Image: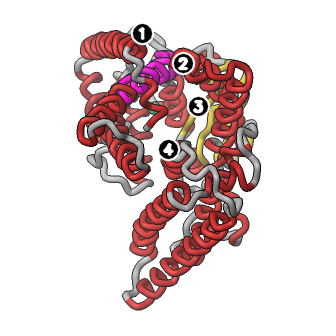
Amino acid sequence: MVLQAAPFLIAVCIAIAADTPVSLSRPDGGLIALFVAVSTILASACVSVGLGTWLLTMARRKSWTPAQLRMGLLRTTFVLCFFNLAAFAALTHLGGWPDFVRYGLGLRKMIVAERFVIVAPFILMDVLGWLGMFPVARNCRLIMTSRGWHYYIVMRARETYGAVLPAAIIFWAGNDIARLLVGDLTKQPWVQMVVLAVLGTVIVLISPALLKLSFPTRSMPPGPLRTRLEGVARNLKFRFSDFLIWETEGSVFNARLTGVLPGYRYVLFTDALITHLDDDEIAAIFGHELGHVYHGHYTVLALFCLGSLAILALVAQGIDGVFRVIQGGSNTSSVIDITKLVLMLAAVGVYFRLAFGAVSRTLERQADVYGCKSVSCVTENCIHSTGWPRLASSPGLGPNICRMGIKTYSDALRTVAVENQVDLEKPSWRHGSIGSRMRFLANLDSHPENEWRFQDGVIRVRLLVGMSFLLLFVFALVTGAFEYLRSI
Ligand SMILES: [Zn+2]
Ligand SMILES: [Zn+2]
């Protein structure tokens, strides 16, 4: 979801960077800008149709397998995405599109509308791109293509924009309303922080609705699996709204928990997960998701993002400083703005890949341990040591991880890897490779005392990260670095 939304978020950043009006007094009311916009959108559509046709021709000539075609589609989609972003950047920074929206259409300072219409050409290019690529997607039997192009486009739109667009609209509306209410005070970093915190909270609270908008889901029907999962939830005192089955035409193995309010949150399991895992394994995966809640991982990640904002603000300040030195004070051309933006995005990418990856992998391991515990024996001594059948284990959170708990959870991981045709050692920056996760759990089976060492380590890392982020946050606030996030 985050990955699909990334191009849109970049487009929003590009539009923000074009915030400074360049040609306020354009006499033609910006009709040329409108013409440029329409031409850009048409050009993008032609490029997508061209790339799609080229791919299909290549596939036919070289007898590609569906898998090869899929790889080709993935690469071409990247190329198209870059083309669209570049075209959108040219449209907003050189084509005068934002001015046309503000002055030609008279949407200046109009709540949400101004910002939405400015990024609308990018959304249109994106949708037309899916349409242009649809014949290729259907040929490599991509999911959601079997029911025709309208269904495919609607599903792609839900997946890509279902969460991020409502979130962006809330964000824009909040900022616009804050500007109306307190005027120039919104330029103060602390006011921005308050607005950001309030809007962030609103988005988190309504996230279950956003998730339902993004993915096709249905309530899990009553039956042994539902009863089993309800048992785990009861044992772990976890309150929720519903278990949902997420329809992916059997192609995705995933479970997800969404929402922070006990009375309004969902637990999602994909259809493939339910088909290929037994009830105990699904309970273990559910336990993993509950582990994230029990250990307060969502709070950790929220604080991490806040701290990261401070770090990025400081980086932005640094980049701005370097450019000031290079240019000797003048710092306003749009080429420079775009260069700064690109540098900033590169920094964001590297930072998240490294820092977020490391934190996320540790938290995932902690959730893995919890997943094992949720299907382990509740008694001090494991009843499985003599080889009891797995289903005899009572769902619960025992004081120790039991051998069968580890086996159940590891079996689930292995099945997911096999069914996904993922190599056990394939690295994953957010979760770590499945092989390394299984080895870590096997080690806990032979050396149970290592669990407490691990848990202590996690607490230490959390404290260290928390303290340094707090310090950096205060430092960024005091030095006014957050101002630079706006200017970049
Ligand atoms: Zn997880
Ligand atoms: Zn046991």
Q: Earlier in the sequence, mark 3 or mark 2?
A: 2
Amino acid under disc 1: Pro
Residue topped by disc 4: 17
- Whole-angstrom CA distance, mark 1 to mark 3, is 24 Å
Which x, y percent locates residue 284? 49, 30
Going 69% across and 63% down the picture, which residue do you hit? 28
Q: Which residues are magenta?
A: 291-312
Task: Tell me if mark 4 has few (under 14), some (14-19) or many (20+) residues whose alpha carbon lies within 10 angstroms of its own.
Answer: many
Q: Earlier in the sequence, mark 1 or mark 4?
A: 4
Q: Verify CB contact (< 8 Å) between mark 1 and mark 4.
A: no
Observer-nearest of 190 and 26 = 26
Residue 406: in sight, yes or no? no
Which x, y percent locates residue 128? 62, 68
Task: Tell me if mark 2 has few (under 14), some (14-19) or many (20+) residues whose alpha carbon lies within 10 angstroms of its own.
Answer: few
- Whole-angstrom CA distance, mark 1 to mark 4, is 54 Å
Depicted 228 relative to depicted 239: above or below: below
Q: Is residue 47 left or right of residue 261?
A: left
Residue topped by disc 2: 188
Q: Nearer the viewer, mark 1 or mark 3?
A: 3
Q: Verify CB contact (< 8 Å) between mark 2 and mark 4.
A: no
Going 54% across and 30% down the picture, which residue do you hit? 286
Quarter of the rendering occupied by the C terminus: top left
Which x, y percent locates residue 180? 73, 26
Depicted 184 relative to depicted 341: above or below: above
Q: Nearer the viewer, mark 1 or mark 2?
A: 2
Q: Which mark is residue 399?
A: 1
Amino acid under disc 2: Gln
Q: Earlier in the sequence, mark 3 or mark 4?
A: 4
